[in-house]
Amino acid sequence: MKISKQLSKWTIVVALSSLVTLFAFNPSSTNYFEISKNLDIFATLYREVNTYYVDDVDAGKLIKTGITEMLKSLDPYTNFISESEAEDFRFQMTGQYGGIGSLVGTKGEYVVITEPYEGYAAQKADLRAGDIVLEIEGKSTKGKTTSDISKMLKGQPGTPVKLLIKREGEGELLKTITREEIQIKNVPYSGIINNDIGYIRLASFTQNAGKEVRDALIELKKNTKLKGIILDVRGNPGGLLHESINIVNVFVQQGQEIVSTKGKVSEWDKVYKTLNQPVDTETPVIVLTNRGSASASEIVSGSIQDLDRGVIIGQRTFGKGLVQSTRPLSYNTQLKVTTAKYYTPSGRCIQALDYSHRNEDGSVGSVPDSLKKSFKTKSGRTVYDGGGITPDIVTNTSDFSKITESLITNQLIFDFATQYRIKHASIQPAKDFKLNEQDYTDFKQFIANKNYDYQTKSEKALEEFKLKAEDEKYFEAVKAQYDNLKQNLHHDKLADLEKNKAEIIQLLELEIAKRYYFQRAAYEMAYKNDDDIKESLKLFEDINKYKKILSKK
């Protein structure tokens, strides 16, 4: 065993040494001497560590750490994908996996079902949000992470998995669920608002995203009164480049340039144009964005803006203008590597951070306003590069109150929804569902003996003042005033529950509605409370303002 182990370690050293030879004679590498020298240093360093380190060295772990740290110095998107991680990567690209179809979260020492996907195995087996997973295939889940549980639940479609769950009011239940091929939809919801405005929620850019948007719009256009389309890419982190082009193609003519890429290697200097006939090039379009809209979402929103095909509403996007591709490595591993930057039709790159030039501490800088360049849209409007897509109409984000944050963090809104589902077999349709005064009184009674302490911003600022005053030896002189102010600021939970009642009720209604109508409830209920959607509806009512925004200023 000892000899075999030593041989496997020396195999790595031999492999590294062969890399030295490979790079030394590779004419495509202009700096091959530096590369071969440093690979030789790495190989000899590993040999010495392996030979003389006091304990046995885990070869795979040590090399993986070296690879990870090396790539970390480049950008956050260049990653090594091990053989064991290949399935997770495939899911990111395709949205497909074999499993039961449910989101999970932690609750104490166990994992809890937080949201079964409608129409999939978990929901068919009556697995509900709030169910605590005690065992999987007879093995305790106590202390397991959500990642551990997800891996245990995944498997080949058609295979069974046994779950022992604990449901409030019913005790322990044994569920045998047959795994299915789970396909996470890129368009989880589409519908009509106010009888004449179409809404399409685009959550991801995996395979067939363009087809899903196309199909959704065709269905919406069956409404002959349709006078506007909202495409929502808020919180969408991006995905496949070609799907972003297919999505824009739904709204613009065939043969239109949507994005170009430029890299160090000339093969990545490409121009991508629409290939298909559009569905609708006339109906007014609004794209909703926020700080979580990145990469492919920025190609869609940026090209729609550059081509003056629609108005962007929301907050400035993330600013990820980097393109990744995967390169196969040995032993079924892969490298996801940043190969190019992308540019919208006006010529602007919206990459916000410069990873190619790092400061001495390893940090990277953003593009300063003084270096941002102006570009022109198709009609001659001025837009800028250097940090995401800036909406045509910028809306404000509103933070939850401290008491609401505490209720969410301590899972009290989630737990109350679980109780509500037990007591009520059905509710009104999501868009019509409302809690009454007695329901809110029940909620206050439910949390009366629960711990949800929190610190307001004023209390935090006062505490920071105290620390600074103590450090500067001034505190004793103002201690009486401090104590008095602290007493006056000390939050009254009951008062805060009333002060923030509307906000809390909205979240309660949403969480409860999801127990009956799943994810679509979130979108149907958003119409009532979503400020960005309200702003969009207001703009559609003033079509002259819409046209003025898209005209040359």
Image (tube, helix red, strand yellow):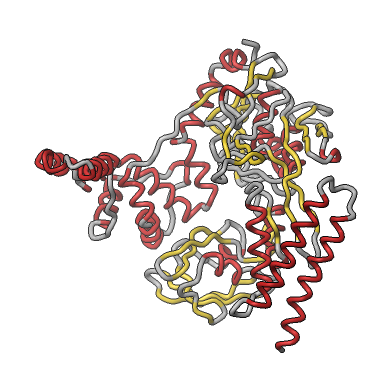
Q: Nearer the viewer, residue 453 or 192?
A: 453
Residue that extends furthest to the bottom in the rendered view of this protein: 1
In the image: residue 412, left or right of residue 526: left
Q: Nearer the viewer, residue 473 or 396?
A: 473
Q: Position of residue 47 (x, y in %)?
A: 71, 72
Q: Position of residue 78 (x, y in %)?
A: 69, 50
The C terminus is located in which quarter? top right
In the image: residue 357, left or right of residue 444: right
Residue 382 visible in the current orientation = yes
Q: Position of residue 89 (x, y in %)?
A: 69, 58
Residue occupying image coordinates x 44% and y 42%: 432
The N terminus is located in which quarter? bottom right
Residue 498 visible in the current orientation = no
Residue occupying image coordinates x 73% and y 25%: 347
Residue occupying image coordinates x 39% and y 63%: 422
Number of labelled discs? 0
In the image: residue 489, left or right of residue 340: left
Residue that extends furthest to the top in the rendered view of this protein: 553
Q: Position of residue 326 (x, y in %)?
A: 77, 52
Quarter of image, res 355: top right
Quarter of image, res 267: top right
